[in-house]
Image: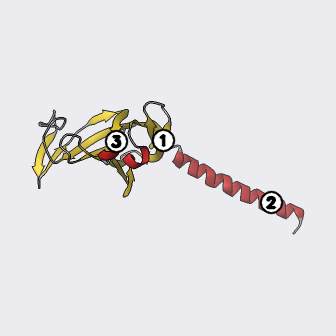
């Protein structure tokens, strides 16, 4: 193959790779893409992260320390914040809601209390994770046992724009 043709072929391949990179970069650096960080509260060390998009949802479940029943907290990424939009629990006792706030509804459905239409925004969430609490993160049909991953510690969950 003549040297000029070989050089043109390499240049063409390089341009294609650059174009693919640019197209992928525009996706990665879009305003709708975030990193959800799980940080050790005491050391401020990042323990776990994943990419999440605007309007993506995730759920954190745990065993309530007083009621000893499962609690489900449903979150959504909205306008660069973590939005708690629904809360499910099985018992009303210390630390669990007994009434809805403005524009929220609290219903009992098949033995489950459901606090719906919540719009509580957070830039960060602090959890006291403990092994016996069975803290679990569910995101896109994947389950992460936070209690097993992190043991007993305070965990800060923050969102950052990519």
Q: Nearer the viewer, mark 3 or mark 2?
A: 3
Residue receiving disc 3? 130
**Judging from the image, what secondary structure is the residue with disc 2 in?**
helix
**Judging from the image, what secondary structure is the residue with disc 1 in?**
strand
Answer with left or right where residue 80 lies relative to residue 22. left
Q: Distance between the residues labelled 1 and 3?
A: 15 Å
Q: How crowded is mark 3: few (under 14 residues within 10 Å), some or many (20 or more)?
A: some
Residue 96 numbered tag:
none
**Judging from the image, what secondary structure is the residue with disc 3 in?**
loop
Q: Work out whether residue 162 or residue 36 is closer to the camera in this orientation and state it.
A: 36
Q: Work out whether residue 106 or residue 33 is closer to the camera in this orientation and state it.
A: 106
Residue 61: x and y, percent? 29, 48
Answer with left or right where residue 113 lies relative to residue 155. left
Residue receiving disc 1? 47
Q: On screen, 101 above or below 26? A: above
- Identify the residue at horizontal 31%, vertical 34% (top origin): 121
- Identify the residue at horizontal 50%, vertical 35% (top origin): 45
Residue 68: x and y, percent? 20, 45
Answer with left or right where residue 21 lies relative to residue 153. right
Give the mark nearest the N terminus, 1 or 2. 2
- Identify the residue at horizontal 37%, vertical 52% (top origin): 139
Residue receiving disc 2? 8
């Amino acid at each position: 193959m003549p040297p000029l043709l070989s050089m043109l072929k390499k240049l063409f391949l390089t341009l294609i790779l650059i174009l693919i990179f640019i197209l992928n970069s525009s996706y990665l650096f879009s305003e709708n893409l975030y990193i959800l960080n799980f940080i050790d509260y005491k050391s401020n060390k990042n323990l776990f992260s994943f990419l999440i998009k605007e309007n993506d949802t995730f759920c954190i479940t745990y065993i309530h320390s007083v009621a000893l029943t499962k609690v489900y907290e449903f979150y959504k990424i909205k306008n660069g914040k973590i939005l708690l939009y629904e809360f499910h629990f099985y018992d009303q006792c210390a630390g669990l809601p007994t009434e809805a706030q403005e524009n929220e509804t609290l219903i009992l459905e098949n033995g489950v209390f459901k606090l719906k239409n919540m719009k509580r925004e957070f830039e960060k969430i602090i959890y006291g994770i403990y092994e016996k609490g069975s803290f679990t993160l569910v995101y896109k049909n994947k389950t992460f046992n936070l209690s097993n991953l992190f043991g007993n510690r305070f965990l800060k969950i923050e969102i950052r724009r990519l």
